[in-house]
Image: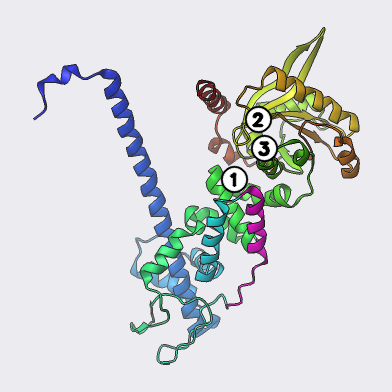
């Protein structure tokens, strides 16, 4: 029975208690959804292996997938998600991630969480270059053959069509589940896996997109757009022009170089046919959430055409962002023309101003990003020589590639600004 002293409960403490309980309920729901998603993926992976096993027994001419889809519709009419198309994807899923690949991804994932950005990219390259010599299909002799030959990583005990159990692995089904659920494959949803399976990506690139999807909270539509715009090539493989190594300490220089893209692709559906810098700025701010999506991990909008009075003169910086991971302001200068050496000097000036006027004691060095409609990389690299402020130079392209259905999935400008305000207030009070 409750005490009669309820009226003595401190309201603020009780409100905090209710908030803590609410947070636990919400987190529990996320955990349940995440666990359910991982279990569904494991089920699809097993289904794919069952089908691959049967295809090996009877050959492609047996039309196993078509017959299985018909049988499921007949015997389990209430079960959805087992169309010929989806069963085919399950086969591709199992074929793409045999146990040997899952183990390698877990090993890479463990290294990637404790090493530098440079080592993460090296791990991706290692995955790309790894050759898995085992046949991706389960090439298993018929169940009545006592000497079962396994040509790939052993699968689970799979029931054949006669109902007998074929012993085709030394690993218990529980161990297979543990391996699968421990891999990064289990952390994104099925729709995102279908997007990845629809693209001819190397294993390391697939892994990188999976990691980005989890870290950035991408929907399958956003993932599809990022793959179609060759985000991996633009962020990882491109020869980027910057002086970060010379002007920033090693951990931050690696991260800044990793986050820089070349080229950037901006969706400016409302821009003029021949857009100038101001028109581009207006469109980027108008569609700031899509702009920040393209900018990448941890960017928040601060100001456009930020006014600074220096001496007796007025100056206006095109765009100022803040990157939470870099813990630094980023000054962006837009040019509607190809790169010219004098552009670097102008950007260097604005970096100095932001360092003096905005940068706090807990902020790292301000970084400059010059976006041009093309550049001569040799000229650009020469232009950066001698500057002691960190500057990156990238091309940008104008596109109408962002689908309409992404708009509702992206945060509003108010949410973006609120996120930045909360972060900066927290930082000031720490």
Q: Is residue 373 magenta?
A: no
Q: Nearer the viewer, mark 3 or mark 1?
A: 3
- Looking at the image, residue 179 sits to the left or right of residue 405; the answer is left
Q: Is 352 or 2 nearer to us in this picture? A: 352
Q: Which residue is mark 3?
A: 295
Q: Is residue 119 magenta?
A: yes
Dot 3 or dot 1, earlier in sequence: 1
The quarter of the image holding the N terminus is top left
Tell me which segment is drawn in magenta: 116-134
Residue 294 position within the rendered picture, expressed as x and y whole percent measured from the top left: 66, 39
Dot 2 or dot 1, earlier in sequence: 1
Q: Which residue is mark 2?
A: 364
User: What secondary structure is marked by label 2?
Assistant: loop
User: What secondary structure is marked by label 3?
Assistant: helix
Residue 107 position within the rendered picture, expressed as x and y whole percent measured from the top left: 53, 61
Q: Which residue is mark 1?
A: 222
Q: Residues within 10 Å of mark 2 (few under 14, many from 20)?
A: some
Q: Are marks 3 and 1 in contact (CB under 8 Å)?
A: no
Q: Residues within 10 Å of mark 1 (few under 14, many from 20)?
A: many
Residue 380 position within the rendered picture, expressed as x and y whole percent measured from the top left: 87, 39
Q: Nearer the viewer, mark 2 or mark 1?
A: 2
Residue sitting at 84 percent across and 25 percent down?
346
């Amino acid at each position: 029975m409750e005490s009669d002293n309820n009226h003595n409960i401190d309201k603020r403490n009780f409100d905090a208690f209710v908030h803590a309980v609410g947070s636990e309920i919400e987190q529990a729901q996320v955990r349940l959804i995440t666990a359910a998603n991982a279990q569904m993926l494991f089920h699809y992976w097993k289904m794919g292996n069952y089908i691959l096993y049967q295809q090996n027994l009877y050959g492609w001419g047996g039309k196993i997938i078509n017959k299985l889809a018909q049988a499921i519709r007949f015997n389990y009419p209430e079960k959805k998600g087992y169309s010929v198309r989806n069963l085919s994807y399950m086969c591709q899923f199992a074929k793409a991630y045999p146990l040997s690949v899952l183990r390698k991804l877990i090993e890479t994932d463990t290294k990637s969480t404790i090493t530098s950005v440079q080592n993460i990219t090296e791990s991706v390259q290692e995955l790309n270059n790894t050759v898995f010599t085992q046949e991706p299909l389960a090439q298993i002799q018929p169940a009545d053959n006592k000497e079962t030959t396994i040509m790939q990583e052993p699968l689970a005990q799979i029931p054949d069509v006669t109902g007998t159990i074929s012993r085709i692995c030394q690993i218990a089904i529980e161990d297979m589940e543990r391996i699968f659920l421990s891999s990064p494959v289990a952390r994104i949803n099925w729709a995102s896996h279908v997007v990845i399976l629809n693209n001819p990506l190397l294993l390391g690139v697939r892994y990188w997109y999976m990691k980005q999807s989890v870290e950035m909270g991408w929907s399958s539509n956003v993932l599809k757009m990022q793959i179609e715009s060759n985000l991996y090539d633009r962020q990882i493989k491109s020869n980027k022009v910057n002086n970060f190594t010379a002007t920033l300490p090693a951990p931050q220089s690696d991260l800044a170089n990793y986050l820089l893209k070349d080229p950037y692709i901006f969706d400016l559906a409302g821009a003029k046919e021949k857009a100038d810098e101001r028109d581009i700025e207006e469109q980027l701010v108008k569609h700031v959430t899509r702009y920040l999506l393209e900018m990448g991990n941890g960017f928040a909008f601060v100001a456009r055409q930020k006014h600074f009075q220096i001496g007796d003169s007025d100056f206006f910086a095109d765009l100022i962002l803040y990157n939470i991971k870099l813990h630094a302001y980023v000054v962006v200068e837009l040019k509607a023309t190809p790169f010219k050496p004098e552009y670097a000097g102008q950007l260097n000036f604005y970096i100095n101003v932001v360092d003096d006027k905005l940068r706090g004691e807990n902020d790292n060095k301000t970084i400059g990003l010059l976006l041009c409609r093309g550049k001569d990389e040799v000229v650009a690299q020469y232009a950066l020589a001698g500057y002691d402020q960190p500057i990156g130079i990238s091309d940008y392209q104008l596109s109408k590639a962002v689908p309409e259905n992404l708009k509702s999935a992206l945060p509003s400008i108010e949410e973006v600004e609120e996120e930045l305000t909360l972060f900066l207030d927290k930082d000031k009070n720490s």
